[in-house]
Image (cartoon, rainbow, N blue to C red):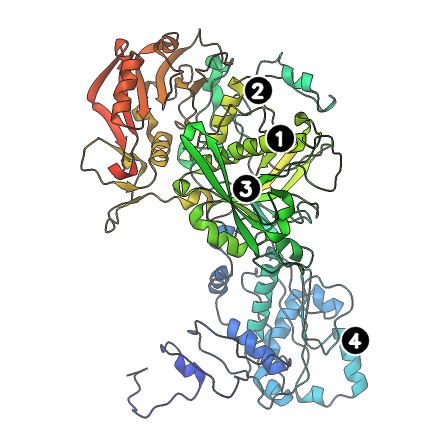
Amino acid sequence: MWQKIEDAEWRPQTYLELEGLPCILIFSGMDPHGESLPRSLRYCDLRLINSSCLVRTALEQELGLAAYFVSNEVPLEKGARNEGLESDAEKLSSTDNEDEELGTEGSTSERRSPVKRERSCSHDSASSSLSSKASGSVLCGEPLAQPMGSSQGEQTLSPPPCGLAEEARAPAEKQRLRATQGPPVALSRHSPGPAPPPDCCCSVGPRRWVLLPLPWHSPAPPQIGKTGAYLQFLSILSRMLIRLTEVDVYDEEEINTNLREESDWHYAQLSDPWPDLELFQKMPFDYIIHDPKYEGASLICSYHQSARSEDRGMSRKPEDLFMRRQTARMRLSKYAAYNTYHHCEQCHQYMGFHPRYQLYESTLHAFAFSYSMLGEEVQLHFIIPKSKEHHFVFSQPGGQLESMRLPLVTDKSHEYIKSPTFTPTTGRHEHGLFNLYHAMDGASHLHVLVVKEYEMAIYKKYWPNHIMLVLPSIFNSAGVGAAHFLIKELSYHNLELERNRQEELGIKPQDIWPFIVISDDSCVMWNVVDVDCGGERSRNVDLTQNVQYNQNRFTCDDVDFNLRVHSAGLLLCRFNRFSVMKKQIAVGGHRAFHITSKVSDNSVAIVPAQYICAPDSKHTFLAAPAQLLLEKFLQHHSHRFFPLSLKNHSHPVLSVDCYLNLGSQISVCYVSSRPHSLNISCSDLVFSGLLLYLCDSFVGASFLKQFHFLKGATLCVICQDRNSLRQTVVRLELEDEWQFRLRDEFQTANAREDRPLFLLTGRHV
C-alpha cells in the first residue's frame, strides 16, 4: 500500500505524487513542459530531450530537472546546509565572492535601499499567483528567492510590476519602464555594458549571468514557483565555472629556517654574477631539510648542529604532523599545466588531434640495457606515437629503436626545450598534469610519462599522443625510487649511445646535452627570476654515473640521493630563483599504496605498530611491499628501536650509506662508507644509536670502530633474509661491542612469498 492509499485502481495524476516511490519514469512521445518533479528524483537522462530549438519551456524543463525551487518559508540555515552539497567538502570555501550582492538592474534608488526592496518583494508576493496566471509569465509577479548561503544583510531581488495593469499600459509607457527599471527579469553578476539582445537565452562571461525571457511558443504554460530554483542553479553553475579557472596549491613556509650555517660561510647574493661555478664551490652543503612536505622527517646533523640542534623547535604539534597540508587557491595563468579535462583549440594537436595521424596511432618498442646491480639485462618498453617518432633514432623507419635524440650544448636556439622531461606517475591518468603545451608556451619539448606495466593501457587511453616509458612488471608494486632509478640509468645509457652516434658525424662527445628533468605529475605552474631553465629537478646523468637512486624506496628517496651525491664530491645546487607550484591532487601518487590485511574477511584497521612482527609468529600478514612497511614503521615507531635518541639531538643516530626517516623527534647523522667520501667530522660526536640498512662490502668492522656510542645505545641491522642478518653480524664483528638477544629479532609483516625484510636490534655494552 502506497501512501496509505487503499484504492486498488489508484493511478498517479501528477509527478509530485511519485515522491519517494522507487520507480523508473519514462516519458513516451512527449516532453515534460514545466511540470514540478518530486524532490526524491535521483537521476535524469537528458540525452533524448530535443534541444534543437530553444523555447522557454524547454529551458525551464532542463533547468528544473537539475534544481529545485527553494521556498521563502525554508529557514536560512537549512538552505545554507543544502548549498554545501554543490562543492567538495575538502575544498573549504569557494572563491566566487559569495558575499557580493545579487540584484536586478533596477533604478539607482532601489539599489541603495535593501529594506525597500525587501518590502517590495514581500508585498508583491501576496498577489503573485493571480498576476502570474493573468500575464502568462513564470518570471512575473513572484519574488526572486534570495540565494542560499547569503547573509541577512544582502539585497534581495525585487520583481517588476506585472499583472493585468501592466498588460494595459501603452507601448510608450512600457518603453519608459524598461528604460528606468531594466529588463523584466535579469540576473547579473558584475555585468557592465549593454544587456544581451532579447532573443538570447543565456549570456555567459567572466562572472556574468543574465537570464532573459524568450518568446512564448509553448501551448502549456509553465508552473509557478521555479524562478528561485533557476537562479539558485545559475548561481551554483557560475561558481563552478569560476572554480574551473582556479587550483589549490600547497602553500607552506620552508621548515627549519631557524637553523642556519656558520655566519662566516658565504651564500650567493642577488648582486653576485650567476651562474658562477667558482662561487658555487665555495658555498657549503646545506644538510638541513627545508621542504615543508618533510616536516615530519628526521633532522640531519651537520657541522654546527651537534651543539644547538635542540633549538630546532616544532612549528606544528606532533599530532598535527600527519594532517592535511596547508593549501591556497590560485588563479591559473596562461602558462599552466593541465590534466585530461582541459580542452582548447590551441592544444588539440598536442593532445593527438593531428590531421596527418590517426588517433591512438602509436607503436611499442623494446629498449634493453645491462646493469650489473640488478644482475640481469633490463628491458624497458616505449610507447611512441607516430607524431613523436622524430624524437628517436631507429635502425630504419618502423624498425628497432636505437636511441633518443639529444641536442647539443652549443645550440643556443630557444625554439625548443633541451632537457628531456620524465614524469613518474601512478593512479593519476585523469588528474595528472601532463598537458604541458601552455606551460611550455607551445615550444617543442620531449616529455615522457613513466608508468607501471599494469597501468599502461589506461594511461594510453587518456593520453594517446604522449610518449610512455613502461617499467618492467617486477616493479608493479615498487615505489617512486624504482622509477627514479630506471630513469637515471636509462638516461645515462642513452647518453652513451648518442655520443657514439653523433661522434660518427664529427661531433665531440662532451658537446652532447647531458641533462634531464625529473618532474612531479602535480607541477601546475612555475616561475623563474632572471634565469632560463625549466622543469623541477635537473640532473646531469654524466657526472652522477656512479651514484644511483635506491630502487627500493617509497619515501625520502630524493633526500637519500642528494646526500650520496654530495658525499661523492659532486656539486649539488638548489636554484632558489626557480619556484614550482604543486597542485593538491587527492588521488594517486603515494596514496595509491594501501596497507591491508591478506585475510579478506579481516575488517580491523591496521596501524603502523603492526607493520613488523616476530619471525615465525602467528601475526596477521599484510598485503603491502616489505620496504613500505619498514619505512612507515620507522617513521612512526622508531623510538622503540632507539629509545635514547628520542628528543636527544645532541646524540643522533648514526646512519651508514642511507637516510631513513625515523620521525621528527629523532636526529640522524649520515656518513658514507665509500673511499674518499666527503663526510662531516664525527670525532666530537657521541651517538645514541646505529642504523645499518642493507649494508654492502664497503662497510667493514674497522670503519665502524672509529665512531663512539653512548652506553646503552641501540643498534638496528636490516637485511633481506635471516641468513644475511647473521652473516652481517659476524662480518662486522658486532658482537664485540653489542649485545644481542633472540627476542630482539623482527621481520616486516609479510608472508614468506612476499619476501619480508628482517631486523635485528642490539644494545651497546
Q: Label 4 belongs to which residue?
A: 179
Choose the circle earlier in sequence order: 4 or 1: 4
Closest to the observer: 337 or 425? Answer: 425
Q: Please identify, in this view, whether the residue under mark 4 or under mark 1 is nearer the observer.
A: 1
Choose the circle earlier in sequence order: 3 or 2: 3
Q: Label 1 belongs to which residue?
A: 500
> Residue 482 falls in which quadrant of the image?
top left
| Residue 694 appears left or right of 168 | left
The local secondary structure at tag 4 comes to: helix
What kind of residue is marked 1? Asn
Q: Label 2 belongs to which residue?
A: 570
Q: Distance between the residues labelled 4 and 1?
A: 79 Å
Q: Distance between the residues labelled 1 and 2?
A: 25 Å
Q: Label 3 belongs to which residue?
A: 423
Choose the circle earlier in sequence order: 1 or 2: 1
What kind of residue is marked 2? Leu
> Residue 145 falls in which quadrant of the image?
bottom right
User: How many C-alpha atoms fall within 10 Å of the one at disc 2: few (<14), some, or many (≥20)?
Assistant: some
Q: Please identify, in this view, whether the residue under mark 1 or under mark 2 is nearer the observer.
A: 1
1 and 2 marks in contact (CB < 8 Å): no
Closest to the observer: 717 or 45? Answer: 717
